[in-house]
Structure formats: C-alpha cells, structure tokens
C-alpha cells in the first residue's frame, strides 16, 4: 500500500514537472496576437463569436500582405467565463508567444487579466469587456461602449427622441453587465426628464418567469420598459408581455442583439422593439455585407455584435501597429508603449462605427446607433 | 522506522509529499524551467488542494455530505478581500495579508458555526440538501451586498449602489454583482504552500487525536458513540467549524490572487461544491493525501488539455469518468491490487517459498 502510494506520488510529481518544462518557442517573424473568451459553457456564444470573427479579420489581413510586411499568427483560448480560468488562458497564450492580447470577451475576466497585462506591460484591447473598471490601467483599451456610457446613452436617446417619460426597467441583478447599465441609466434618467417608476430585478437563478416583474410595470402604468439584459431573457419577457396583453414600448441595449436569430422565436413579438447596438447584421454597407457573408460561409451563422467588435479590434490593432511602424522583434513592453500612443492617433472605419477613435483612458469614441425591429428585421432609427 | 506507528508514518508521507512537491517546484522555478501557464496555476493548485483537505474533514472524517463548501470559501474570499481593500493604504503587505487570511478564516468559521447549528441536526440526504441551500444563499447574499467608503466611514446597502449616498470622494468596495475589484495581489506560491501545509498538519493531527477518534466514532456509529458518552453535537460542530475555517483561508488565498472577485454561479455556486466533492471522492473518501492528489490532477487536467482546443472539456469529462470507474470498480481495484509492484514481488516470493516447501 505504502509503496504504491509512493510510486503514485513520484509519478505525479514527475508528470507535473514534465508539464512545466515545455519551454515556449518564440519566433520574431510574425505578430503574435492572442484572443480569449468563453468557448464552452453558457456564454460560449460570445467567446466563439469573438474568436471566429478575429480569425476572419486575421485571414483577410494576412491575405492582403500582413501588417508592415509581417504576417499575423493568431490563437484563441477558452476562459470558461471565469476570472481564474481567464488568467490561465492568458498565461497559456503567453507561453505560445503572444505579443498583443485581443480579449477577454467579458467584463469579469477582462478585469482579472488586465492586472496581469499591466504586470507584463502587454497591450490589451478587449472587444466587448464593457465594465467600467476594465480600462482602469493605461495599457487596456476597448472596442465597445462601457456599461455606464450605454446606460447614459440609452437615457439620452429615450429622452431626446421623447419616447417615454415614465419608464420601468427589468434587469439581471446577478450580472455585472446588466446591473452596470441599469445603475447608470437610473442615474442619468432624471437629466432627460425620465421617471424610472419601477425597477425589477431578477437573477441568473430566476430567469425563466417574469410575470411578476411585468405585472409591477403594468400596475405602475409605464410607457416604456427598459431591458438592459441579454436576448434569451428578453425573448421570454416579450412572450409573457404579449400573453398579458401589455401594450408598452421596449428598449434595450446591445445584449438584445441576436434576438431574431433565436430558435423558435416568434418574430412578430419583437415588432417595435428598439435597441442601442453598434452593429446590425443586415446593414447594407459593403464592409458589413462582406463580413457577414464571410462569417456565414465559414461558421454557418449570422455574426452578432461581439463578432463585429472583435473584427474591428483586429483592424484597430493593425492600424495602430502601422502607425507606430512596429516590427515583431520588438519587446512586448516596447510594443505596448508604442501601441498605447499610436491607438489614440488612429481613426478607423469599422463595422461598429464609421469613425472610431480612442482616447488615452481606453474608451472608444463613436456614434451610438439605435435600431428598431420592423417586419422581422433590424432597421436603423433616425 | 519500525517503531513509529503506521498512521504516523502515513501522515509523515503525506506531509513529505507536499514538502517535496514544493521543493521541486521551487527548484524548477529558480532554474527558470516553469512556463508562465504553470507558474500561474501554482496558487490555484494550493487553493484547491486546501479545499480538498477541508472538505475531506467533513465528508471523509466526520462522514457528513456537505454540498455547500464553496459557500464558505466565498465568505472567506469576500471577507478577506474586503479587509484588504479597507486597510490597503494603512498597512504593509505582510501584516495585511496575514491578517486578511485570519479574517477570512475567522469569518468563514463564524458562518460555519452558525450554519452548523441547524444543519448538523439533520442526517444524510437532508443534511446534504440544506448545506446546498446555504451555499446558494451565501452566494446570492454576496450578489446583493453593496459596501462603500467615504470620509464619513463605511456605508452598507442591500438595495443598490445609489442608495449608499457616497460623497464625491467615495469609493465602492463591494459593488453587488460586480463584486470586489482591485484586491491587492498578495498571494504567492510560498504562502499558498504554507496554508496547505498547515491545514494538512492540523487535519492529520486532529484525526489522530482524542477528538479525531471521537469524530470518527460518530461517523461509524452515532448511537454507539452516544451511548459511551461522546458528546456528538460538540464534536460535529468542532469538525464542521474547523473545516469552514480552512475553507475560508483557501478563499482568502483565492481572492488575493485575482483582481476581480465575483460570486458567479459557476465560481461559488453548487458546481464548485460538487467539484470539491469530486476531489474527495476520487481521492478516496477519508484519505487526505488522496484528496490532495485528486485536486491537483483535476485542476491541472483541463489546463494541460488546452492543446485539444474544442475537445478539451469533452476529453476532461471522459477522463473523469474513466478515473471514477478505475478507482471504484471492484474488478479494476482487484486488478490493481494484484499487479501492484509490491504485491507482485511478494506473491512471487510467496510462490517460490511455496515451491521450496513443496520440494
């Protein structure tokens, strides 16, 4: 018994040691860009979209001759929507030779990884980590709007277009994205003459029945319900609102994007729903058309805004590298310093905005777009 | 060596294994032979191994099925991170982290004690269900807790951030579902190793003490233990609370290794508790060494399998099932028993001796 145990411990120790010793191979003939996001688990949609779309952008760039004459090596890793695993994914990418990080996809992971990139001074551009704290360090930039600015801009949009004055909101209090937008929306609402009459929370454990929240909104007589949530729950809310015969407007943020592609979703339910999103897959500019066609061909589905953010992210990195005239043999830290300055000097035309510029605090500056669902399709609102 | 008791030798083996692993890793680290992926995994490995030791105390030694252990880790993580955030400016790294670990352990211990009072009155499945519920309650409580600080002191709320009425210079410490961000990076492998070593020594020593024998007597036959005058409630509470304290320390280590601490269902929900239970079951219920080894294998496995890309989780679960079968199936156990190096030699020797006698 004892010998067996000793044998097992010896085996394990040596196995561990062998695993640790795999040295990283690093060649300075290409730019190594890594991406990370949840590729498994409940949020796999988002990570997969980011990793796939970045792949498309990388392939396009490589085909066109690369960046400053150098090709891009690209790899995506799974972080399982978990801060700890995202750090593991980041370390694995670092061993692979990553010089620039496009990711992580979600807020919590992005915050955890940002501390690591700060320690290594690696340039980090998160496509969709929208939480306020993500860009706290000066080496972190993002492609999407931050949560507070989404909430604020939603209030601005509703107020300026006089969509409603009495508003209810239904949000997921256990989700950082949803709670973040709700808080900033509520804070900004009075400035635009909006009265948030009721706010109803649900959590990840209770996201299948919303009749009591809808009843509260109905009792308060709201004109519009604000839904800073993801589309799966929004679909349920719309179905239940129809069943209750509730006649109100619905307004959401980019999380509602993707609703029309849900399986077995009755599209007429979403008629008239407005959402603030940077990307609509059926926009008719060439860039979007080209991207959507390529994505559909490669992965067999319609890309969402996460995909669009990642695609723009790769092109932003390209533009910044070109601006800085960077070469792959630069140290990671020097590359970061060069890119930090360069990204504030570039302006790109992307899927999520015709004119995207960055400020030194990591935030993108682009026009918010709102779309309304009409006849089962997204139509830009004016 | 022979005059040392078998259990003591076994325990020394476990402790020796931990120290040996630590020394090997430190040597490799100094030699620069560890890649960053492994380097980043060292502290989580200590966290999970400590959690396995902690849960093994409840499941293996006390014999009660707890499905809420992630809850105690959650409490320890939040309490210690909260403490570190509050005193960040006013204390040096070393005393702050030491106190943070103690705070994490103490708060988790208090929770363990309070939850233990109702829970340990139950038996078997009912106890498992109630611990599961408490684990979920703790996670959800953390998600509605808002704490901020400004010149006037600390503000608490369970409604939302706005109702804290913070002043201009105010700072959020616990921000509801956004959790705690920016916990100082105090954890390192040496501290993780020390926490694991101390918890292991405490648990092993407890098992071989008068208290430990009483606890195991309760596990084996509660009525018999009661009839000879063992105070059942007292010993059950002691084991449960100690287990919670260790889980709290592991939580403190966890929260000081990441800058973002969020109580998500995947992180501190029942999935996590089940994972800890898998460590204990795979390691052989009641065996501290087995639990530590299982926790290390199961934490490393998904990371080592990264080269499989999309098939990673699939392969991981298959390996898990295979391990369960090999570990617990009577036939495969008998086969291992037969082909074990020590046993093969012994059976050969016995066979040859039998041959001699026959001649």
Image (spheres, coloured by chain):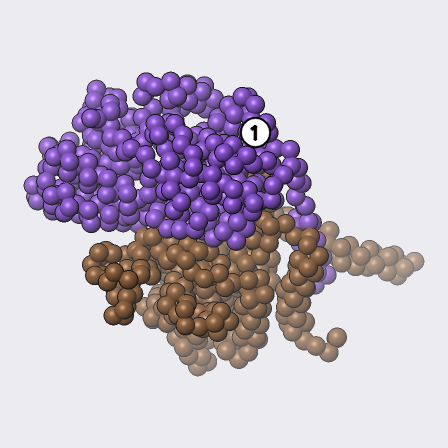
Chain colours: A purple, B brown
Chain assignment, label 1: A
Question: Closer to the camera, B120 or A308?
Answer: A308
Q: Is residue A166 rendered to the left or right of residue A55?
A: left
Indicate the position of residue A184 as horizontal and vertical percent values.
Answer: 24, 47
Q: Mark 1 = which residue?
A: A68
Indicate the position of residue A200 as horizontal and vertical percent values.
Answer: 19, 47
Indicate the position of residue B154 as horizontal and vertical percent values.
Answer: 28, 68
Q: Is residue B229 rendered to the left or right of residue A9?
A: left
Please tell me how crowded label 1 is: few (under 14), some (14-19), or many (20+) other residues with Cα within 10 Å: some
The residue located at (22%, 45%) in the rendering is A185
The residue located at (28%, 66%) in the rendering is B150
**Does A359 sit above or below residue A2?**
above
**Does B257 sit above or below residue A347?**
below
For the image, the number of numbered tags is: 1
The residue located at (55%, 66%) in the rendering is B191
Q: Residue furthest bottom?
A: B229
The residue located at (34%, 52%) in the rendering is B178
- In which quadrant is the C terminus of chain A drawn? top left
Question: Closer to the camera, A295 or B291?
Answer: A295
Residue A217's image quarter? top left
Q: Is residue B198 rendered to the left or right of residue A205?
A: right
Q: Residue furthest right?
A: B359
**Does B77 sit above or below residue A214?**
below
Give the SS element for disc 1.
loop
The answer to whether residue A185 is seen in the rendering is: yes
Question: Closer to the camera, B313 or A93?
Answer: A93
Indicate the position of residue B53 as horizontal and vertical percent values.
Answer: 53, 64
The answer to whether residue B319 is seen in the rendering is: no
């Amino acid at each position: 018994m004892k010998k067996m145990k000793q044998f097992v411990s010896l085996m394990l120790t040596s196995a561990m040691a062998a695993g640790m010793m795999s040295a990283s191979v690093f060649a300075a003939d290409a730019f190594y860009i890594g991406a990370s996001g949840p590729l498994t688990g409940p949020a796999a949609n988002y990570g997969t979209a980011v990793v796939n779309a970045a792949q498309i952008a990388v392939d396009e760039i490589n085909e066109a001759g690369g960046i400053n004459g150098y090709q891009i090596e690209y790899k995506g890793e799974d972080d399982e929507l978990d801060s700890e695993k995202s750090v593991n994914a980041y370390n694995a990418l670092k061993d692979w030779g990553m010089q620039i990080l496009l990711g992580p996809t979600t807020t919590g992971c992005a915050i955890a990884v940002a501390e690591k990139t700060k320690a290594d001074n690696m340039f980090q551009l998160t496509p969709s980590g929208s939480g306020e704290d993500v860009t706290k360090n000066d080496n972190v930039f993002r492609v999407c709007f931050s949560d507070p600015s989404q909430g604020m801009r939603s209030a601005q949009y509703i107020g300026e277009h006089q969509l409603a004055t009495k508003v209810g909101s239904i949000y997921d209090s256990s989700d950082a994205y949803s709670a973040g937008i709700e808080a900033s929306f509520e804070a900004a609402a009075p400035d635009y003459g909006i009265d948030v009459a009721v706010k109803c929370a649900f959590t990840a454990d209770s996201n299948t029945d919303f009749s009591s929240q809808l009843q509260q909104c109905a009792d308060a007589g709201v004109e519009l319900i604000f839904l800073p949530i993801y589309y799966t729950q929004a679909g349920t809310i719309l179905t239940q609102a129809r069943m209750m015969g509730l006649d109100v407007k619905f307004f959401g943020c980019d999380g509602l994007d993707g609703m029309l592609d849900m399986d077995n979703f009755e599209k007429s339910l979403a008629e008239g729903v407005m959402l603030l999103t940077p990307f609509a897959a059926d926009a008719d500019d060439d860039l979007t058309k080209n991207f959507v066609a390529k994505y559909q061909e490669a992965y067999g589905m319609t890309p969402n805004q996460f995909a669009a953010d990642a695609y723009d992210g790769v092109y932003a990195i390209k533009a910044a590298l070109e601006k800085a005239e960077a070469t792959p043999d630069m140290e990671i830290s020097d590359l970061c310093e060069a890119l930090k300055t360069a990204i504030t000097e570039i302006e790109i035309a992307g899927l999520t905005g015709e004119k995207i510029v960055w400020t030194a605090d990591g935030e993108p500056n682009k026009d918010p777009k709102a779309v309304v669902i009409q006849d089962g399709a997204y139509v830009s609102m004016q | 060596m022979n005059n040392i008791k078998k259990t003591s030798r076994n325990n020394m083996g476990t402790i020796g294994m931990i120290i040996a692993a630590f020394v090997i890793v430190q040597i490799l680290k100094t030699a620069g032979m560890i890649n960053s992926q492994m380097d980043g995994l060292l502290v989580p490995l200590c966290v999970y191994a400590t959690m396995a030791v902690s849960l093994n105390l409840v499941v293996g030694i006390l014999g009660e099925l707890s499905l809420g252990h992630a809850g105690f880790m959650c409490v320890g993580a939040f309490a210690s991170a909260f403490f570190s955030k509050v005193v960040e400016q006013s204390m040096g790294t070393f005393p702050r982290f030491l106190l943070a670990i103690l705070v994490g352990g103490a708060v988790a211990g208090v929770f363990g004690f309070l939850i233990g009072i109702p829970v340990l009155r139950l038996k078997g499945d009912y106890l498992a269900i109630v611990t599961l519920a408490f684990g979920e309650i703790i996670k959800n409580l953390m998600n509605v807790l808002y704490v901020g600080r400004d010149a006037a002191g600390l503000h608490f709320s369970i409604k939302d951030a706005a109702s804290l009425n913070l002043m201009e210079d105010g700072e959020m410490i616990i921000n509801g579902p956004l959790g705690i961000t920016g916990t100082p990076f105090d954890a390192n492998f040496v501290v993780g190793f020390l926490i694991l070593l101390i918890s292991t020594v405490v648990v092993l020593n407890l098992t071989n003490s008068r208290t430990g024998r009483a606890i195991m007597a309760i596990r084996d036959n509660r009525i018999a233990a009661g009839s000879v005058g063992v105070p059942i409630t007292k010993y059950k509470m002691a084991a449960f609370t100690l287990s919670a304290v260790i889980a709290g320390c592991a939580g403190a280590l966890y929260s000081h290794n990441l800058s973002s601490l969020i109580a998500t269902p995947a992180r501190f929900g029942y999935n996590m508790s089940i994972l800890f239970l898998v460590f204990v079951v795979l390691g052989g219920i009641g065996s501290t060494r087995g639990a530590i080894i299982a926790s290390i294998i199961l934490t490393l496995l998904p990371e080592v399998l990264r080269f499989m890309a999309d098939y990673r989780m699939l392969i991981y679960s298959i390996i898990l099932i295979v391990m369960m079968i090999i570990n617990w199936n009577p036939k495969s156990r008998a086969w291992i028993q037969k082909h074990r190096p020590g046993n093969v030699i012994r059976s050969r020797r016995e066979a040859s001796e039998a041959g001699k006698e026959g001649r």
